[in-house]
Image: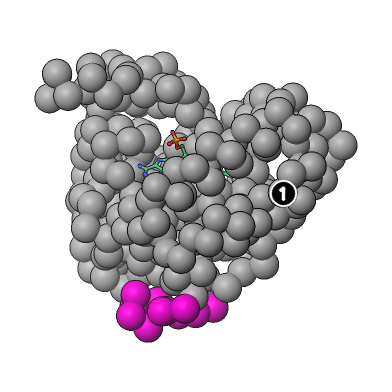
Amino acid sequence: QEYTAIKLKVKEWSESAKQILDGKLPEGANVYFIPATLRPETMYGQTCCFVGPTIEYGVFKVSETEYYVCSARAARNMSFQPGTFPEWGLSPQVAAFKGKDVIGTVINAPLSIHTQGVRILPMETVKDTKGTAVVTCVPSDSPDDYATVVELAKKAEYYGIKKEWVDLEILPIIDTPAYGNLTAKKLVEDLKIQSPKDTKKLEEAKEKAYKEGFYKGIMIYGDFKGRKVEDAKTLVRNQLIESGDAFAYAEPDGKVISRSG
Ligand code: ZZB
Protein backbone atom coordinates (compact mmCIF):
# COMPACT_ATOMS: atom_id res chain seq x y z
CA GLN A 1 0.00 0.00 0.00
CA GLU A 2 1.53 3.33 -1.08
CA TYR A 3 0.47 6.17 1.21
CA THR A 4 1.30 9.85 1.28
CA ALA A 5 2.65 10.78 4.72
CA ILE A 6 1.73 14.38 5.58
CA LYS A 7 3.70 16.58 8.00
CA LEU A 8 1.41 18.37 10.46
CA LYS A 9 3.60 20.71 12.49
CA VAL A 10 2.86 21.19 16.18
CA LYS A 11 2.05 24.81 17.06
CA GLU A 12 1.01 24.35 20.69
CA TRP A 13 1.09 21.17 22.79
CA SER A 14 -1.72 20.19 25.14
CA GLU A 15 -0.89 20.70 28.84
CA SER A 16 -0.36 16.97 29.51
CA ALA A 17 1.88 16.64 26.46
CA LYS A 18 3.99 19.57 27.69
CA GLN A 19 4.61 17.78 30.99
CA ILE A 20 5.49 14.47 29.34
CA LEU A 21 7.83 16.10 26.81
CA ASP A 22 9.51 18.41 29.31
CA GLY A 23 13.28 18.26 28.79
CA LYS A 24 13.07 15.63 26.04
CA LEU A 25 13.30 17.88 23.00
CA PRO A 26 15.85 20.56 22.17
CA GLU A 27 14.83 24.21 22.19
CA GLY A 28 13.16 25.17 18.91
CA ALA A 29 12.62 21.56 17.72
CA ASN A 30 9.97 21.13 15.01
CA VAL A 31 7.67 18.22 15.79
CA TYR A 32 5.24 16.81 13.23
CA PHE A 33 2.29 14.43 13.52
CA ILE A 34 2.50 12.13 10.49
CA PRO A 35 -0.86 10.87 9.17
CA ALA A 36 -0.78 8.43 6.25
CA THR A 37 -3.40 9.14 3.59
CA LEU A 38 -4.61 7.62 0.32
CA ARG A 39 -6.39 10.88 -0.58
CA PRO A 40 -3.81 13.69 -0.88
CA GLU A 41 -6.19 15.62 -3.16
CA THR A 42 -8.52 16.16 -0.19
CA MET A 43 -5.99 17.87 2.09
CA TYR A 44 -7.65 21.29 1.54
CA GLY A 45 -10.50 20.10 3.75
CA GLN A 46 -8.59 18.88 6.82
CA THR A 47 -10.48 19.98 9.96
CA CYS A 48 -8.53 18.08 12.66
CA CYS A 49 -6.18 15.12 13.08
CA PHE A 50 -7.12 11.91 14.89
CA VAL A 51 -5.19 9.69 17.26
CA GLY A 52 -6.41 6.56 19.05
CA PRO A 53 -6.76 7.60 22.72
CA THR A 54 -5.32 4.33 24.07
CA ILE A 55 -2.72 3.82 21.34
CA GLU A 56 0.95 4.38 22.20
CA TYR A 57 2.85 6.87 20.05
CA GLY A 58 6.52 7.68 19.88
CA VAL A 59 8.43 10.87 19.08
CA PHE A 60 11.20 9.92 16.65
CA LYS A 61 14.28 11.96 15.82
CA VAL A 62 14.82 12.62 12.11
CA SER A 63 17.44 15.38 12.55
CA GLU A 64 18.58 17.85 15.22
CA THR A 65 15.56 20.00 14.41
CA GLU A 66 12.91 17.55 13.10
CA TYR A 67 10.91 14.96 15.04
CA TYR A 68 8.00 12.77 13.89
CA VAL A 69 5.05 11.47 15.91
CA CYS A 70 3.65 8.09 14.81
CA SER A 71 3.49 4.46 15.93
CA ALA A 72 6.80 2.68 16.58
CA ARG A 73 5.89 0.17 13.89
CA ALA A 74 5.47 2.91 11.29
CA ALA A 75 8.71 4.64 12.29
CA ARG A 76 10.52 1.35 11.87
CA ASN A 77 8.98 0.87 8.40
CA MET A 78 10.03 4.41 7.46
CA SER A 79 13.61 3.72 8.49
CA PHE A 80 13.83 1.09 5.73
CA GLN A 81 12.60 3.56 3.11
CA PRO A 82 14.54 6.44 1.60
CA GLY A 83 13.97 10.05 2.53
CA THR A 84 13.04 10.01 6.22
CA PHE A 85 15.54 8.81 8.82
CA PRO A 86 19.20 9.42 7.94
CA GLU A 87 20.47 5.97 9.05
CA TRP A 88 19.09 2.87 7.38
CA GLY A 89 17.03 0.79 9.81
CA LEU A 90 17.29 3.26 12.70
CA SER A 91 14.40 5.32 14.08
CA PRO A 92 15.68 6.83 17.36
CA GLN A 93 12.86 7.41 19.85
CA VAL A 94 13.07 10.32 22.31
CA ALA A 95 9.66 10.20 24.01
CA ALA A 96 6.40 8.24 24.23
CA PHE A 97 2.79 9.06 25.08
CA LYS A 98 -0.75 7.78 24.67
CA GLY A 99 -3.08 9.42 22.19
CA LYS A 100 -5.22 10.78 25.03
CA ASP A 101 -2.24 12.79 26.32
CA VAL A 102 -2.06 14.93 23.20
CA ILE A 103 -5.78 15.68 22.68
CA GLY A 104 -6.21 19.41 22.08
CA THR A 105 -2.70 19.94 20.68
CA VAL A 106 -2.80 22.52 17.87
CA ILE A 107 -1.10 21.61 14.59
CA ASN A 108 -0.74 23.21 11.20
CA ALA A 109 -2.30 21.07 8.43
CA PRO A 110 -0.68 21.75 5.01
CA LEU A 111 -3.09 23.03 2.32
CA SER A 112 -6.01 23.14 4.76
CA ILE A 113 -8.28 26.18 4.51
CA HIS A 114 -8.16 26.21 8.32
CA THR A 115 -4.86 28.10 8.39
CA GLN A 116 -5.19 29.15 12.03
CA GLY A 117 -4.40 25.52 12.92
CA VAL A 118 -6.46 22.43 13.73
CA ARG A 119 -6.64 20.18 16.81
CA ILE A 120 -5.59 16.67 17.65
CA LEU A 121 -8.82 14.82 18.55
CA PRO A 122 -9.71 11.27 19.63
CA MET A 123 -11.01 8.58 17.25
CA GLU A 124 -11.71 5.24 18.86
CA THR A 125 -11.62 3.31 15.58
CA VAL A 126 -8.02 4.21 14.68
CA LYS A 127 -6.10 1.01 14.06
CA ASP A 128 -2.67 0.60 15.60
CA THR A 129 -1.67 -1.80 12.84
CA LYS A 130 -2.34 0.36 9.79
CA GLY A 131 -0.53 3.35 8.32
CA THR A 132 1.08 5.47 11.04
CA ALA A 133 -1.86 5.23 13.54
CA VAL A 134 -2.30 8.99 12.94
CA VAL A 135 -5.27 9.89 10.71
CA THR A 136 -5.94 13.30 9.21
CA CYS A 137 -9.63 14.19 9.21
CA VAL A 138 -11.44 15.18 6.00
CA PRO A 139 -15.15 15.09 6.84
CA SER A 140 -16.26 16.12 3.33
CA ASP A 141 -14.91 12.95 1.70
CA SER A 142 -14.24 10.34 4.37
CA PRO A 143 -17.38 8.73 5.86
CA ASP A 144 -15.45 7.55 8.95
CA ASP A 145 -14.25 11.09 9.58
CA TYR A 146 -17.69 12.59 9.05
CA ALA A 147 -19.32 10.10 11.45
CA THR A 148 -16.60 10.79 14.03
CA VAL A 149 -16.86 14.59 13.92
CA VAL A 150 -20.65 14.36 14.30
CA GLU A 151 -20.20 12.10 17.33
CA LEU A 152 -17.48 14.29 18.89
CA ALA A 153 -19.56 17.45 18.44
CA LYS A 154 -22.62 15.76 19.96
CA LYS A 155 -20.75 14.50 23.02
CA ALA A 156 -17.87 16.96 23.32
CA GLU A 157 -17.88 16.96 27.11
CA TYR A 158 -17.88 13.16 27.32
CA TYR A 159 -14.83 13.06 25.03
CA GLY A 160 -13.07 15.76 27.05
CA ILE A 161 -12.85 18.24 24.20
CA LYS A 162 -14.27 21.66 23.39
CA LYS A 163 -17.09 21.67 20.85
CA GLU A 164 -15.43 24.44 18.86
CA TRP A 165 -12.36 22.21 18.30
CA VAL A 166 -14.48 19.91 16.15
CA ASP A 167 -17.03 22.31 14.67
CA LEU A 168 -14.96 23.63 11.76
CA GLU A 169 -16.39 24.40 8.33
CA ILE A 170 -16.65 21.34 6.08
CA LEU A 171 -15.23 22.37 2.72
CA PRO A 172 -16.67 20.94 -0.53
CA ILE A 173 -13.61 19.79 -2.51
CA ILE A 174 -14.83 17.22 -5.02
CA ASP A 175 -18.06 17.08 -7.00
CA THR A 176 -19.48 13.67 -7.96
CA PRO A 177 -22.56 12.76 -10.00
CA ALA A 178 -23.90 10.29 -7.40
CA TYR A 179 -23.24 12.11 -4.11
CA GLY A 180 -22.83 15.81 -4.86
CA ASN A 181 -19.99 17.80 -3.29
CA LEU A 182 -20.08 16.46 0.26
CA THR A 183 -19.77 12.75 -0.51
CA ALA A 184 -19.17 11.57 3.07
CA LYS A 185 -22.15 13.43 4.56
CA LYS A 186 -24.42 12.16 1.79
CA LEU A 187 -23.34 8.53 2.23
CA VAL A 188 -23.55 8.64 6.05
CA GLU A 189 -27.09 9.98 5.76
CA ASP A 190 -28.20 7.65 2.92
CA LEU A 191 -26.87 4.54 4.66
CA LYS A 192 -28.33 5.73 7.99
CA ILE A 193 -24.98 5.46 9.76
CA GLN A 194 -25.61 6.34 13.42
CA SER A 195 -22.15 6.25 14.92
CA PRO A 196 -18.45 5.71 14.15
CA LYS A 197 -18.95 2.16 15.44
CA ASP A 198 -21.28 1.21 12.56
CA THR A 199 -18.24 -0.43 11.03
CA LYS A 200 -19.96 -2.58 8.41
CA LYS A 201 -21.94 0.27 6.92
CA LEU A 202 -18.92 2.56 7.15
CA GLU A 203 -16.85 0.04 5.21
CA GLU A 204 -19.51 0.06 2.47
CA ALA A 205 -19.66 3.87 2.51
CA LYS A 206 -15.86 4.08 2.22
CA GLU A 207 -15.77 1.74 -0.79
CA LYS A 208 -18.50 3.76 -2.50
CA ALA A 209 -16.80 7.06 -1.72
CA TYR A 210 -13.44 5.84 -3.04
CA LYS A 211 -14.93 4.51 -6.29
CA GLU A 212 -17.18 7.45 -7.08
CA GLY A 213 -14.56 10.01 -6.05
CA PHE A 214 -11.73 8.44 -7.99
CA TYR A 215 -13.52 7.56 -11.24
CA LYS A 216 -16.13 10.32 -11.46
CA GLY A 217 -14.96 13.08 -9.13
CA ILE A 218 -14.03 16.56 -10.35
CA MET A 219 -12.00 18.97 -8.22
CA ILE A 220 -13.98 22.10 -7.31
CA TYR A 221 -11.33 23.61 -5.02
CA GLY A 222 -7.59 24.28 -5.09
CA ASP A 223 -4.90 24.62 -7.73
CA PHE A 224 -6.34 21.79 -9.84
CA LYS A 225 -9.94 22.97 -9.83
CA GLY A 226 -11.75 21.57 -12.89
CA ARG A 227 -9.44 18.55 -13.19
CA LYS A 228 -10.45 14.94 -12.66
CA VAL A 229 -9.63 13.49 -9.23
CA GLU A 230 -7.81 10.70 -11.05
CA ASP A 231 -5.28 13.29 -12.31
CA ALA A 232 -5.36 15.72 -9.37
CA LYS A 233 -4.38 12.99 -6.90
CA THR A 234 -0.83 12.76 -8.27
CA LEU A 235 -0.58 16.50 -8.92
CA VAL A 236 -1.45 17.46 -5.33
CA ARG A 237 0.75 14.66 -3.97
CA ASN A 238 3.75 15.88 -5.97
CA GLN A 239 3.11 19.46 -4.90
CA LEU A 240 3.06 18.45 -1.22
CA ILE A 241 6.24 16.41 -1.60
CA GLU A 242 8.04 19.21 -3.46
CA SER A 243 7.12 21.78 -0.82
CA GLY A 244 8.51 19.48 1.88
CA ASP A 245 5.09 18.99 3.48
CA ALA A 246 4.83 15.26 2.68
CA PHE A 247 6.79 12.14 1.74
CA ALA A 248 6.02 8.73 0.31
CA TYR A 249 5.33 5.98 2.83
CA ALA A 250 4.82 2.41 1.71
CA GLU A 251 3.42 -0.28 3.92
CA PRO A 252 4.36 -3.93 3.61
CA ASP A 253 1.21 -6.08 3.50
CA GLY A 254 -0.40 -7.41 6.70
CA LYS A 255 0.85 -10.97 6.43
CA VAL A 256 4.47 -9.90 6.24
CA ILE A 257 4.06 -7.71 9.33
CA SER A 258 2.47 -10.44 11.45
CA ARG A 259 5.04 -13.05 10.45
CA SER A 260 7.98 -10.83 11.29
CA GLY A 261 6.37 -9.73 14.56
C1 ZZB B 1 -7.52 11.31 4.50
C2 ZZB B 1 -8.70 10.84 3.78
C3 ZZB B 1 -9.64 11.58 3.08
C4 ZZB B 1 -8.81 9.44 3.81
C5 ZZB B 1 -10.70 10.91 2.45
C6 ZZB B 1 -9.85 8.74 3.22
C7 ZZB B 1 -10.81 9.47 2.53
P1 ZZB B 1 -7.91 2.10 3.70
O1 ZZB B 1 -8.67 2.48 2.52
O2 ZZB B 1 -8.68 1.22 4.64
O3 ZZB B 1 -6.52 1.59 3.43
N1 ZZB B 1 -6.51 5.68 7.86
C8 ZZB B 1 -5.17 5.64 7.70
N2 ZZB B 1 -4.58 4.98 8.71
C9 ZZB B 1 -5.58 4.57 9.52
C10 ZZB B 1 -5.60 3.86 10.75
N3 ZZB B 1 -4.48 3.43 11.34
N4 ZZB B 1 -6.80 3.61 11.34
C11 ZZB B 1 -7.94 4.06 10.76
N5 ZZB B 1 -7.97 4.76 9.61
C12 ZZB B 1 -6.81 5.02 8.99
O4 ZZB B 1 -7.71 3.42 4.55
C13 ZZB B 1 -6.88 4.48 4.19
C14 ZZB B 1 -7.52 5.69 4.76
O5 ZZB B 1 -7.99 5.38 6.09
C15 ZZB B 1 -6.56 6.84 4.88
O6 ZZB B 1 -6.85 7.88 3.92
C16 ZZB B 1 -6.95 7.45 6.21
O7 ZZB B 1 -7.96 8.39 5.88
C17 ZZB B 1 -7.52 6.33 7.01
F1 ZZB B 1 -11.59 11.59 1.78
O8 ZZB B 1 -6.78 10.11 4.78
B1 ZZB B 1 -7.63 8.90 4.59
C18 ZZB B 1 -13.37 7.19 1.12
C19 ZZB B 1 -12.17 7.52 1.98
N6 ZZB B 1 -11.88 8.90 1.88
Amino acid type of the residue that numbered disc 1 sits on in the rendered structure: Tyr
Q: Main secondary structure of the magenta part?
A: loop
Tell whether position 162 is magenta.
Answer: yes
Looking at the picture, how far across and down is residue 127, in whole percent?
Answer: 30, 44
- The answer to whether residue 9 is above or below residue 105 is above
Q: Going by the image, does 38 lie left or right of 44? A: left
Residue 171 place in picture, x, y as percent: 71, 58
Q: How many marks?
A: 1
* Above or below, 13 relative to 41: below
The spot of residue 125 in percent (x, y) is 33, 53
Q: Residue furthest front?
A: 191
Residue designated by label 1: 179
In the image, residue 117 lies at what x, y percent? Answer: 57, 62
Q: Is residue 49 one of those drawn in magenta?
A: no
**From the viewer's perspective, is 98 left or right of 231?**
left
Please say whether residue 223 is visible from this viewpoint: no
- Structural crowding at the residue carrying mark 1, measured as other residues with C-alpha within 10 Å and reported as few (<14), some (14–19) or many (≥20): some
| Highlighted range, magenta | 154-164
Residue 82 makes an appearance in the image: yes
Q: Is residue 140 left or right of residue 63?
A: right
Q: Secondary structure at mark 1?
A: loop
